[in-house]
Amino acid sequence: MNNFNDIIENLDNIVYKPNNLMITNLKEEKQNSEYAGGIFQLNNKTIRFRVSKITPNKIGQFVSFWEKNENMQNQAFSYDSAPDLLVITCINDNKLGQFIFLKEILLIEKILKTQSQKGKMAMRIYPIWDNPVSDQAKKSQMWQLQYFVDLSDTNNLSMDKLLNLYFVDSCFRFVSGSKKKESLPYVITIFSHAFAGGVSYAGTTPRKVLIDFLYNF
């Protein structure tokens, strides 16, 4: 069984602290303790955290995320109350990586619950070292890897991608004047995903926000 506090401490030492990222408000989500479930704040970002599990008879890894409703039945997390990011850490022998999903991306993929969609309580993920066979699995890996960072080699981390995925603001707006040009590829990735999903929430569409972003770039 994954130990939430031990895993967070390890990531803090190799990823967060060296990049001046501070963890606060750490709280375990015991209903998903099998997946090292928890929430915390990383600088100004709220994070829901999980560690995925290897499934010996199926390619990829599996992860669960759910809460109890008022009737004590399991349900998907809602978009309205979800933290900024869902971070899924993948471990396989000496391999280590993270999927860093904006809540807006989880909305597009119908993972978070809204009034019009049920949401999902689990998903299968495909780290870069996995080679799925079925067309559906390949399609899933294709969109997921846009939000994946390989952390296996601590001396050669892709910190630009990691930091940009962590600190792209919600509603598809990037928050940093000095880093806009360096971050543009990651912003475009998120906008492209949004266009493909046709997402519209609370009157905000990716087209409207993209035009505003480019106007102010």
Image: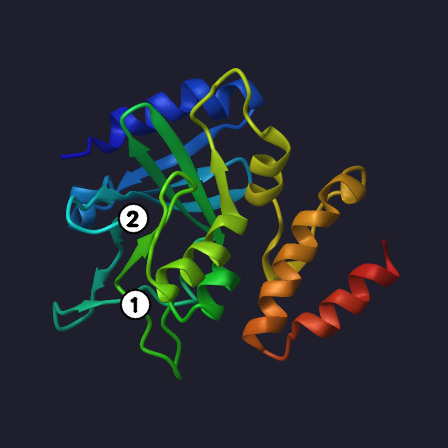
User: Is residue 88 or residue 19 the one in the foreground?
Assistant: 88
Q: Residue furthest top?
A: 155
Q: Dot 1, crowdedness within 10 Å: few (<14), some or many (≥20)? A: some
Percent x, y for residue 101? 47, 52
Q: Quadrant of residue 173?
A: bottom right
Q: Which mark is residue 178?
A: none
Q: Is residue 196 left or right of residue 103?
A: right
The residue depicted at 59 percent of the width and 57 percent of the height is 170
The amino acid on which the numbered mark 2 sits, given as a three-letter code, is Gly
- Residue at the front extreme of this rendering: 133
- Report how many numbered discs are placed on residues in the image: 2
* Figure check: 186 above or below 16: below
Give the image quarter of residue 65.
Answer: bottom left
Residue drawn at (20%, 31%), measured in percent from left and top? 3
Which three-letter amino acid code belongs to the residue tagged 1?
Lys
Task: Look at mark 2 in the image and give the residue it sits on.
Answer: 60
The mark found on residue 120 in the picture is 1
Residue 46 screen position, x and y as percent: 46, 46
- In 3D space, how far apart are the residues under numbered discs 1 and 2 (Cα atoms)? 18 Å
Q: Position of residue 164 (x, y in %)?
A: 62, 41
Return the x and y of residue 186 as percentages of the image width and height: 66, 49
Q: Residue at x 54, y 35 (%)?
A: 43
Q: Is residue 33 above or below residue 115?
A: above
Secondary structure under tag 1 reads loop
Q: Nearer the viewer, residue 182 or 167?
A: 182
